[in-house]
């Protein structure tokens, strides 16, 4: 996977993604990360990339020309390397909300271009010409698109084959059924007077797995009732069994 980030703050993106698992993935060449300075492409003699918005209103807008030329330069580089033109993701609070299945879809691409806005946004005309996907990371407003792009790159990267070791990728499995994670414990057996749940010390693998699933369901129902509703629709048998068991306990 080759990530290309169009930004006014390339060092922010490079510095943020050069450590830990993603840093390792870059040095092992499972992914490449290229941050392109949009300002390098402006034809304005004062290196300006923004201007006032027509119709008035607060704030400045990124202009079409440097955004278009920087994006086309990256697409040209990709094509010259013999690969197909990349999808261009505009990171914006006005986009579709990013989720795990979008990440899985993006992870199958060979190249991805992220366009990071600043100021009050980007001239609509260039967005119409270059952007294929409008994506937000949630219902809150950030000062720029770099952090959202880094969030998405991290999430997509860990789905690229080779990026995670076997032990790291087993974590994905427990999340991918749409439930929140069960509580976990390490040594010591007792800390601040709190004991590790007995069942985890039993060595009975099937019972441990059953307990973990129950804990996941309880937690999801409380914290994310939306995910819980979806889970019971997808797993009607398990839930019916549980309700039957509860009924027989009550009677
Ligand atoms: Cl993608 N960009 C900005 N600037 N703010 C956001 C966002 C994106 N997603 C949530 N808030």
Image: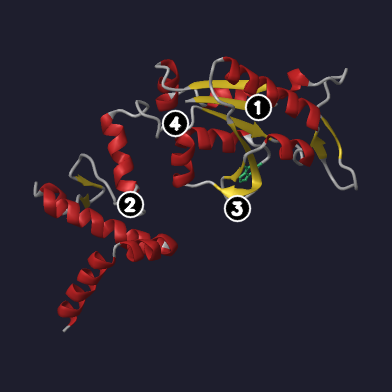
Front of the two marks 4 and 3: 4
Q: Nearer the viewer, residue 1 or 210?
A: 1
Q: Is mark 3 within 8 Å of ligand 1?
A: yes
Q: Give the mark nearest the N terminus, 4 or 3.
A: 3
Q: CA distance from mark 2 to mark 3?
A: 24 Å
Return the residue at label 2.
177
Q: CA distance from mark 2 to mark 4?
A: 20 Å
Q: Can you tell which mark lies on residue 6?
A: 1
Q: Are marks 4 and 3 in contact (CB under 8 Å)?
A: no
Return the residue at label 4.
157
Asked if 208 appears above or below 29 in the picture, the reply is below
Q: Are marks 1 and 2 in contact (CB under 8 Å)?
A: no
Please report the residue visible at 80 percent of the width from the left and 21 percent of the height from the top: 42
Secondary structure beneath label 3:
loop
Mark 2 crowdedness (10 Å alpha carbons): few <14, some 14-19, many ≥20: few
Q: Give the mark nearest the N terminus, 2 or 4.
A: 4
> Residue 153: x and y, percent?
51, 33
Asked if 117 appears above or below 15 in the picture, the reply is below
Q: Can you tell which mark lies on residue 139?
A: 3
- The answer to whether residue 118 of the structure is visible from this angle is no
Front of the two marks 2 and 3: 2
Q: Is residue 130 left or right of residue 246?
A: right
- The answer to whether residue 3 of the structure is visible from this angle is yes
> Residue 163: x and y, percent?
37, 27
Please report the residue visible at 33 percent of the width from the left and 50 percent of the height from the top: 181
> Residue 72: x and y, percent?
69, 24
């Amino acid at each position: 996977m080759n990530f290309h980030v169009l930004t006014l703050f390339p060092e922010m993106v490079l510095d943020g993604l050069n450590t830990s698992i993603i840093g390792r993935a870059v040095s092992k060449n499972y992914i490449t990360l290229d941050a392109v300075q949009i300002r390098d492409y402006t034809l304005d003699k004062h290196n300006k990339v923004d201007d006032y918005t027509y119709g008035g209103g607060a704030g400045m807008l990124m202009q079409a020309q440097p955004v278009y030329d920087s994006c086309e330069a990256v697409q040209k580089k990709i094509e010259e390397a013999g690969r197909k033109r990349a999808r261009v993701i505009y990171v914006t609070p006005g986009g579709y909300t990013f989720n795990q299945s979008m990440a899985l879809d993006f992870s199958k691409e060979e190249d991805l271009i992220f366009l990071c806005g600043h100021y009050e946004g980007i001239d609509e005309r260039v967005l119409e010409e270059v952007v294929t996907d409008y994506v937000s990371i949630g219902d809150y407003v950030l000062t720029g698109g770099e952090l959202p792009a880094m969030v998405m790159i991290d999430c997509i990267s860990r789905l690229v084959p080779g990026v995670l070791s076997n032990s790291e990728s087993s974590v994905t499995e427990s999340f991918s059924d749409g439930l929140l994670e069960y509580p976990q414990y390490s040594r010591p057996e007792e800390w601040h007077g709190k004991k590790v749940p007995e069942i985890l010390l039993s060595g009975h693998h099937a019972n441990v797995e059953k307990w973990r699933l129950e804990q996941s369901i309880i937690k999801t129902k409380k914290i994310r009732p939306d995910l819980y509703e979806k889970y019971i629709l997808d797993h009607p048998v398990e839930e019916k069994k549980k309700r039957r068991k509860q009924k027989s306990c009550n009677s």
